[in-house]
């Protein structure tokens, strides 16, 4: 008895999937499906969005967006929790024409841990995303990945990011990020 044939998904295939509240992504032909995020997950995304947004308004070197379709070829389309793109990409106003993000952030959820930690992380490294933050609220840490890293730097107290052109880094205290409510 032979193995069942798996479908090789493309970004175009995502248009045919149901609008059922799930998030659909594809990485090198592999379909990734995540249910709607939990409230605690969204609270962390919201705090990060505010902190990054306020920093980037002050320093005007990039812009942060929740979600957004990031295309890499016909067989890879991801929707990160947050992504920071350069101002040139913002002016284009089209997700399919952005430059590689400067920072990508994924907040782990029980349903997305494997795909965020392995499948999407490897894609972000392959695409040479300068910084990928993997936020683990359960462990109360942020893993900082770079393109060449075999292992992340694990931040327990604070995480910093210093984009080109900014006079100072953004530093986020993790106790504030992971606060309740």
Image: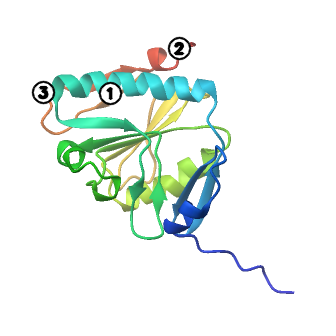
Alpha carbon separation for disc pair 2 and 1: 17 Å
Please report the residue visible at 78 percent of the width from the left and 81 percent of the height from the top. 3
Q: Quadrant of residue 41?
A: top right
Q: CA distance from mark 3 to mark 1?
A: 15 Å
Query: Residue 61, relative to residue 12: is it above or below?
Result: above
Q: Earlier in the sequence, mark 3 or mark 1?
A: 1
Between tags 3 and 1, which lies in front? 1
Q: Is residue 169 visible?
A: no
Query: How packed is label 2: few (under 14 Cα within 10 Å), some, or many (20 or more)?
Result: few
The residue that label 2 is drawn on is 179
What residue does disc 3 label?
A: 167
Mark 3: few/some/many CA within 10 Å (<14, 14-19, 20+): few
Residue 123, located in which quarter of the rendered image?
bottom left
The residue to which callout 1 is attached is: 52
Badge 1 density bin: few <14, some 14–19, many ≥20, Cα 10 Å: many
Name which residue lies at 55% across and 54% down.
Answer: 118
């Amino acid at each position: 008895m032979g193995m069942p044939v798996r479908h090789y998904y493309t970004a175009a295939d995502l248009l045919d999937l149901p609008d059922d509240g799930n998030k659909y992504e594809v990485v090198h032909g592999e379909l990734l499906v995540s249910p709607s995020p939990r409230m605690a997950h969204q609270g962390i995304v919201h705090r990060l969005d505010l902190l990054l947004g306020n920093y980037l308004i002050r320093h005007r070197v990039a812009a942060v967006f929740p979600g957004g379709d990031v295309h890499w070829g016909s067989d890879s389309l991801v929707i990160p929790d947050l992504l920071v793109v350069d101002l040139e990409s913002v002016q284009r106003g089209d997700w399919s024409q952005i430059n590689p993000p400067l920072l990508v952030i994924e907040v782990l959820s029980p349903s997305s841990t494997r795909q965020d930690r392995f499948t999407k992380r490897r894609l972000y490294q392959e695409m040479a995303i300068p910084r990928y933050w993997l936020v683990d609220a359960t462990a109360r840490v942020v893993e900082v990945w770079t393109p060449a890293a075999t292992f992340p730097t694990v931040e327990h107290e604070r995480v910093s990011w210093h984009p080109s052109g900014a006079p100072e880094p953004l530093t986020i205290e993790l106790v504030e990020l992971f606060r309740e409510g």
